[in-house]
């Protein structure tokens, strides 16, 4: 795949906790507290697709200059949300520094696996 667009924004998604007791078996994909993903436009490998369905509109709001506090965020570039299954609480952080340069759309890192 050849990335042709220089993304201005990248995003960090981090698992904060799993309801009710932080046990990975509560999540169908097996996410656990501390898992982190980094992406620009594409979906990072290993990230639950249902979570991406919820995260993508938040990412689009940030890309268009939106203040995430208008969507319930803690800061203009930070928002916590619960996955569609109601199990995993995520934190999405907007990085508007070009830190996604040189990444393919699906490149990611999962700190828990490193």
Image (cartoon, grey):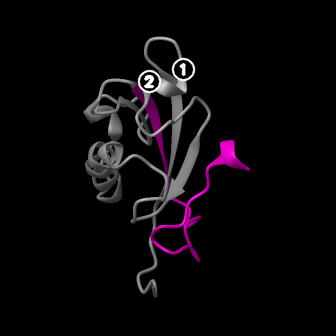
57, 48: nearer the viewer = 48
The residue at 34%/33% (across/down) is: 83
* Separation of marks 2 and 1 at Cα, in angstroms: 6 Å
Quadrant of res 29: top left
Graded by Cα atoms within 10 Å as few (under 14), some (14 to 19) or many (20 or more), the crowding at tag 2 reads some
Q: Which mark is residue 61?
A: none
As drawn, 106 above or below 102: above
Q: Nearer the viewer, residue 26 or 62?
A: 26
Q: Which residue is at 45% across, 85% downward?
A: 1
SS of the residue under disc 2: helix
Q: Is residue 4 left or right of residue 70?
A: right
Which residue bears the numbered disc 2?
Answer: 26
The image shows residue 35, relative to residue 113, as above or below, that is above
> Crowdedness of circle 1 by 10 Å Cα count: few (<14), some, many (20+)?
some
Q: Which residues are magenta?
A: 88-114
Location of mark 1 (residue): 23
Percent of width and height locating residue 49? 34, 50
Describe the element under mark 1 as helix, strand or loop.
loop
Tell me if label 2 and label 1 are in contact, CB under 8 Å.
yes
Q: Is residue 81 left or right of residue 17?
A: left
- Numbered marks: total: 2
The answer to which quarter of the image holds residue 107 is: bottom right
Residue 81, image quadrant: top left
């Amino acid at each position: 795949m050849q990335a042709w667009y220089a993304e201005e924004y990248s995003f960090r998604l981090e698992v904060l906790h799993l309801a009710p007791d932080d046990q990975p078996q509560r999540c169908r994909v097996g996410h656990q507290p501390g898992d982190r993903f980094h992406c620009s436009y594409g979906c990072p490998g290993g990230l639950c697709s249902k979570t991406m369905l919820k995260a993508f509109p938040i990412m689009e709001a940030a890309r268009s200059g939106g203040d995430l506090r208008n969507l319930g965020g803690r800061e203009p570039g930070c928002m916590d949300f619960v996955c569609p299954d109601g199990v995993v609480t995520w934190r999405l952080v907007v990085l508007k520094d070009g830190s996604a340069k040189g990444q393919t759309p699906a490149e990611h890192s999962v700190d828990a696996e490193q």
